[in-house]
Image: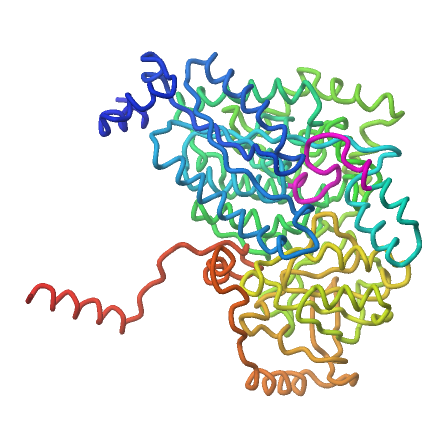
Amino acid sequence: MKEPLNSQRVRHLAPENDPLKIGMGWTIEDLDKPQVLVESTFGDSHPGSAHLLGLVEQAMQGIRDAGGKGARYFVTDICDGIAQGHDGINYSLPHRDMIANMIEIHGRSTGFDGGVFIASCDKSVPANLMGLCRLDMPSIVITGGVMDAGPDLLTLEQIGAYSAMCQRGEITEEKLTYYKQHACPSCGACSFMGTASTMQIMAEALGLMLPGSALMPATSADLQTKAYEAGKQTLWLIEKGIKASDIVTMEAIENAIMVHAAISGSTNSLLHLPAMAHELGIEIDADTFDRMHRGAHYLLDIRPAGRWPAQFFYYAGGVPAVMEEIKSMLHLDALTVTGKTVGENLAALKAEGFYEHCEAYLQPWGLKRTDVIRPFDHPIGSDGTVAILKGNLAPDGSVVKHSAVPREMFQAVLRARPFDSEEEAIRAVLTHQIKPGDAVIIRYEGPKGSGMPEMFYTTEAISSDAELGKSIALITDGRFSGASKGPAIGHVSPEAAEGGPIALVEEDDLIEINIPARRLEVVGISGKRLPTEEVNRILAERRAKWQPRPLKYKNGVLRLFAEHAVSPIKGGYMATEAPEAPEANMQICKNAKIKLLNY
């Protein structure tokens, strides 16, 4: 016998349920329908969220037409770009977890039978993925697409480089102002393969979106249609009882990682996919990414590493076109929200003329699909795009997008220039205190240090400098914007705030980077190369003298995050599970219980 809907079970448990819903306009008939949480990050926060209400209403209409009743809930997100350059960026990663927490509260405090989750950007898409996995009910994702490019295909990720050029006197203030006023001509996620675009693609690659719906132009009528269809599909998922955990399996996650390699996705995915998987009890680590990226074919010619704005991704066929090229590396039998497998979806799209429909958008530009998504046999690269480096500087690991690293920096020994904040580091870069052969080390910027902000301005200052971009490296326990390019190594773990080796590095230590061998090592002291045993002995002496710093934030969200965040290499999420009590604490609990009973 089929179990009753959760919404109906809750109605019978709480007699106030019906009158309260009637009080906000529900009809008597609505009360008996399947009830759907329509969760979005709509708000006047940035272009990626300001347009989402239209998609919410399309999804609501689809739910109504399929016989359900939707309820609109909102938790808007902040924008990394608007938060950039001041302490606001420290809230970026923590607010992912806070949005997930609110989604949990919305979903579990009310009796819903399924959910539609609508978001566009860097932390809002992963937050919704974490939240829907935590709720584990029939769920579907709609993403808000990507903004149009500006004049001469200007896109936002170029502004950081232009700003650094202006500060160095290479372009005028007037020219920079022009770029700033024309870089974002519409709503949608920023038009490059940053974290927002990457995570939209990851949501579809996981099987949680209707096929072909990720990263559509935000101004496209196609996106409105997909939002309506997604709303309708939620009722089918509820009827069939297909939950998030039925779709987000290890096979689905491996599919997403293979797509990540093919698109040269943001390194922030290594924070977000493990955090999402953790909500379902699936533990993936950075080594999983490293293993799967080895030998993977990198196909996508989209900025920041490629030539074209991100709107061209959909024009070239989107996620399905990428999956068609890497079919041999996918689990084609993985289930999706259509109720069909990945392989069945791809066959259906081909039969329906999906690729011809998309490619019509490319024709005015004089481009073919293969100009944007390369064929599998003619890739841009054939060894993936991300590597995990380990060694005595990063015992638990660090992340580098090697597809964006100049070949000259794949193997190098550099002089350490440590800084305890990004502000100090970028000042040194812009005032020419950093020289070729330096390793700029930015520490105490991990989750426990300051919330793990991105080092966007520093990476842009380096990569926009023709000399430094090919002769120095940036190494940090913080993270990078998905727009970053150049010799940048992040997520160094353990982080400095936990006493990781990155906290022990001193001026003129020698740092060896070896991407092919996946190594990141301190190999010398005071400019002199030394045997490994001697280096480790000196690091041990420094560790004995190292003192932990007081928490940077004394109250509020950032203190809470610092107290609970796991390491960068594990996903930087807030660990909410109760730790196992040590034996001594267990005995205290037993004694307290005995006293209570005696009393």
Q: Position of residue 247 (x, y in %)?
A: 49, 34
Location of the N terminus by quadrant is: top left
The answer to if 197 sits in the magenta stretch is yes
Q: Quadrant of residue 418?
A: bottom right
- Check the image and report above or below for 21 versus 278: above
Please say which color scheme the image uses: rainbow
Kindly give the residue lying farthest to the left in the view shown: 598
User: Horizontal placement of 509 versus 288: left or right?
Assistant: right
174 vs 300, nearest the viewer? 174
On the rendered structure, is 561 left or right of 324?
Answer: left
Relative to 506, is 282 above or below? Answer: above
Quadrant for the C terminus, please.
bottom left
- The residue nearer to you, when weighing 267 against 338, is 267
Q: Position of residue 340 (x, y in %)?
A: 53, 24
Seen from the viewer's position, the closer of residues 567 and 240 is: 567
Q: Is residue 242 above or below residue 193?
A: above
Q: Residues in magenta?
A: 180-198
